[in-house]
Amino acid sequence: MSETYLNHPTFGLLSRVCLVDEHRSLFTTLYAQRLFFLIIQSPSGLQFDPITRSDAKMMVENRMRAVKRQGYFDEHDTLQIIYKRTFS
């Protein structure tokens, strides 16, 4: 998984935690990893939706289940590392 960054107009540099689906990604503030954003890509641009830590955690858990069901075990292993680093 490659590292992806976005610049938020208020909170500065955000780092991607994981993809949620084809048009949505989960990002967190780069240094504190306390604020989470669901980034939605659309033809009109990017939408930054703040979400709670518990919602972010649930999104990563759901993504881990989905990739495991699809047989993407390398991505699942990577997500487990990200999950432990981000939410432990």
Image (tube, rainbow, N blue to C red):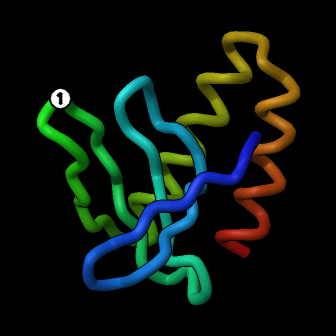
Q: Position of residue 16 (x, y in %)?
A: 56, 56
Which element carries disc 1, helix, strand or loop? loop
Quarter holding residue 23: top left
Q: Amino acid at mark 1?
A: Pro
**Residue 80 left/right relative to 19:** right
Q: Please count the marks in the image.
A: 1
**Residue 6 left/right relative to 23:** right
Q: Position of residue 75 (x, y in %)?
A: 78, 31
Residue at 42% from the left image edge and 24% from the top image edge: 22
Question: From the viewer's perspective, is residue 83 above or below residue 31?
Answer: above
Quarter holding residue 74: top right
**Residue 22 left/right relative to 1:** left
Please name the residue that numbered disc 1 is placed on: 43
Q: Position of residue 65 (x, y in %)?
A: 64, 29
Residue at 45% from the left image edge and 62% from the top image edge: 6
Residue at 48% from the left image edge and 47% from the top image edge: 59
Q: Residue furthest bottom?
A: 32
Which quadrant: the N terminus?
Answer: top right
Question: From the viewer's perspective, is residue 82 above or below residue 12?
Answer: above
Q: Position of residue 78 (x, y in %)?
A: 82, 43
Which quadrant: the C terminus?
Answer: bottom right
19 vs 51, nearest the viewer: 19
Question: From the viewer's perspective, is residue 9 above or below residue 20?
Answer: below
62 vs 30, nearest the viewer: 30
Residue at 46% from the left image edge and 52% from the top image edge: 26
Q: Residue furthest top?
A: 70
- The 10 Å Cα crowd at callout 1, few under 14, some 14 to 19, many 20 or more, is few
